[in-house]
Image (tube, rainbow, N blue to C red):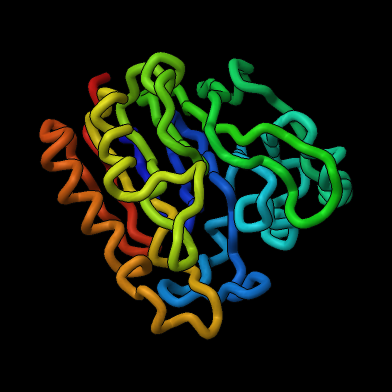
């Protein structure tokens, strides 16, 4: 069966590969603190159906307890090492918790998930002193699919992540400015050029925006997907970029 990628908005994707469904950073809220969903419907119940769920880091727009509570009891949840100590509510969800560090492998059916480094602040803000590393993941099955989570560009990215077939790359954010430890559209295209991917899907843009800031640098909300397509055409011309609408799916061509 072909590999299929569905983008639900923000960093939430479903990767279907080898008969398994892998869900990334589930965020199913209409509103989160000062953020509201400005584009795309809240994902339907079937978006929460997965055998494996990957959480890249502890920020509440990536590790969102009410969204995780929508998962079926017993679903395997992979989180950065230290997440359970930092977010005690994880233990109450009835999920199979697996903590990982960069380099760790998790086998699930015919898939293998490999945790890789990210360059991003992994703390659970604004509460508590506990830290956990921010991670990305490579889902290895019929294809090798890289979910970057949140990360800045770093020199060892290509070596650590390894050649991949599909790259799910963050290209924006949820506010008028991107802080350190993020990829914008241009830096994401640089990352793509290093990774040797055959296909890419831009994520982490055009979904949430701070309430009351609709008129502040609105191009930072609307433009990153198109900007990534443009930069990727220049820096990684051999890569097919799929700019998906919310809830849209694609079956990218893979080498194997």
Side (left or right) of 226 relative to 181: left
| Residue at 85% over, 49% down | 128
Quadrant in which residue 76 is drawn: top right
Query: In this view of the protein, which residue sits in the foreground, 129 or 165?
Result: 129
Question: In this orientation, does residue 113 appear?
Answer: no
The C terminus sits in image quarter:
top left
| Residue at 36% over, 49% down | 184
Residue 212: x %, y % from top left: 52, 85
The mark tally for this picture is 0
Residue 58: x %, y % from top left: 69, 46
The N terminus sits in image quarter:
top left
| Residue at 16% over, 35% down | 235
Quadrant in which residue 106 is drawn: top right
Q: Is residue 141 above or below residue 230?
A: above
Query: In this view of the protein, which residue sits in the foreground, 10 or 26?
Result: 10
Residue 21: x %, y % from top left: 51, 40
| Residue at 58% over, 32% down | 135
Residue 159: x %, y % from top left: 40, 14
Question: In this orientation, does residue 151 appear?
Answer: yes
Side (left or right) of 36 relative to 132: left
Side (left or right) of 38 relative to 193: right
Query: In this view of the protein, which residue sits in the foreground, 229 or 183?
Result: 183
Q: Is residue 216 above or below residue 104?
A: below
Query: In this view of the protein, which residue sits in the foreground, 66 or 37?
Result: 37
């Amino acid at each position: 069966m072909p590999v299929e990628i569905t983008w639900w908005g923000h960093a939430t994707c479903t990767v279907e590969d080898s008969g398994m469904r892998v869900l990334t950073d589930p965020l199913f809220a209409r509103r989160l603190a000062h953020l509201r969903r400005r584009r795309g419907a809240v994902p339907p119940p079937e978006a929460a159906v997965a055998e494996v769920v990957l959480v890249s880091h502890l920020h509440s727009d990536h590790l969102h307890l009410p969204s995780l509570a929508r998962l079926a009891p017993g679903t395997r949840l992979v989180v950065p090492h230290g997440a359970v100590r930092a977010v005690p509510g994880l233990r109450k969800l009835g999920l199979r918790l697996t903590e990982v560090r960069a380099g760790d492998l998790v086998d699930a059916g015919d898939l293998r998930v490999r945790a890789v480094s990210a360059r991003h602040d992994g703390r659970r803000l604004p509460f508590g002193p506990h830290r956990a590393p921010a991670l990305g993941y490579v889902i290895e099955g019929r294809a090798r699919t890289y979910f970057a989570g949140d990360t800045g560009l770093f020199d060892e990215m290509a070596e650590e992540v390894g050649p991949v077939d599909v790259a799910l790359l963050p290209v924006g954010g949820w506010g008028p400015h991107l802080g350190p430890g993020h990829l914008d559209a241009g830096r994401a295209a640089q990352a793509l050029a290093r990774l040797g991917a055959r296909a890419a899907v831009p994520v982490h843009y055009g979904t949430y925006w701070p309430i009351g800031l609709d008129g502040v640098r609105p191009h930072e909300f609307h433009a990153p997907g198109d900007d990534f397509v443009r930069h990727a055409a220049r820096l990684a011309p051999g890569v097919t970029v799929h700019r998906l609408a919310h809830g849209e799916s694609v079956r990218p061509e893979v080498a194997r």
